[in-house]
Image (tube, rainbow, N blue to C red):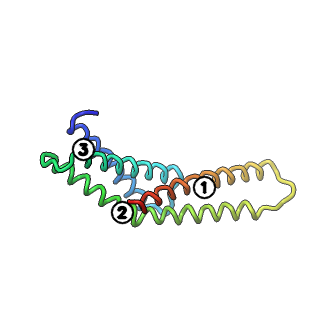
Amino acid sequence: MGSVDDISRMFHTESEKLENLVNNAATKSELSIHEIVETYYQIMNVSSMATMLKQQLGGSNDQNSLIKKIEETQKFISEKFDSNLHPSITIQLTNSLADTTKNLQSDNAVEKSKDEIETKAKLYEKLRQTMSTKEFVEQYEKGLSHD
């Protein structure tokens, strides 16, 4: 990689991106699958970077500002994301799965038009994406319980 200054700048940039994603997500009543995946990816990316940097820096006093930023970012993730946003995303995904499953089960017409078949196919794709995303979110949850 580069110098400590380069790494520090990269961490600051990624942390800001994370804060923007989380703050934006917190203002919405429902997130798209893309927004959920992007947010979790950024959380995991910044968390991994923070862990790695803390290990590399150890107790180095000449990097106090970076260590402080790492600790602030970890606190932000814990308080704003893990405690608030993550549980609401889990509920959103659970409700979406239930609604989509119910919609797919309620249709029992024998003959279907082309539009009905296409709509059904889109619902199955939505169900697949939501299930996959929920599994991804549950893996994050398992990681939280091991920390």
- Of circles 1 and 2, the one toward us is 1
Q: Residues within 10 Å of mark 3 (few under 14, many from 20)?
A: few
Label disc, if present, on residue 80 of the rendered structure: 2
- Of circles 2 and 3, the one toward us is 3
Q: Residue furthest top?
A: 2
Q: Give me the C-alpha separation between circle 1 and circle 2.
A: 24 Å
Q: Is residue 100 left or right of 114 when viewed as pictured?
A: left
Q: Is residue 52 left or right of 37 when viewed as pictured?
A: left
| Precedes in sequence: disc 1 or disc 2 | 2
Query: Where in the figure is residue 48, as x and y percent of width and height?
Result: 35, 48
Disc 2 and disc 3 in contact, CB within 8 angstroms: no
Q: Residue furthest right?
A: 110
Q: Secondary structure at mark 1?
A: helix
Residue 93 falls in image quadrant: bottom right
| Precedes in sequence: disc 2 or disc 3 | 3
Query: Where in the figure is residue 111, as x and y percent of width and height?
Result: 86, 54
Residue that carries the numbered disc 3 in the rendered image: 56
Residue that carries the numbered disc 1 in the rendered image: 131
Residue 81 falls in image quadrant: bottom left
Q: Residue at x 20, y 54 (%)?
A: 68
Type of amino acid under label 2: Lys
Query: Where in the figure is residue 63, as x and y percent of width and height?
Result: 16, 46
Q: Residues within 10 Å of mark 2 (few under 14, many from 20)?
A: some
Q: Secondary structure at mark 2?
A: helix
Q: Quadrant of the C terminus?
A: bottom left
| Precedes in sequence: disc 1 or disc 3 | 3
Q: Residue at x 38, y 47 (%)?
A: 45
**Who is closer to the viewer here, 112 or 6?**
6
Q: Is residue 117 left or right of 79 when viewed as pictured?
A: right
Q: Is residue 80 above or below residue 58?
A: below
Q: Give me the C-alpha separation between circle 1 and circle 3.
A: 37 Å
Q: Residue at x 21, y 48 (%)?
A: 58
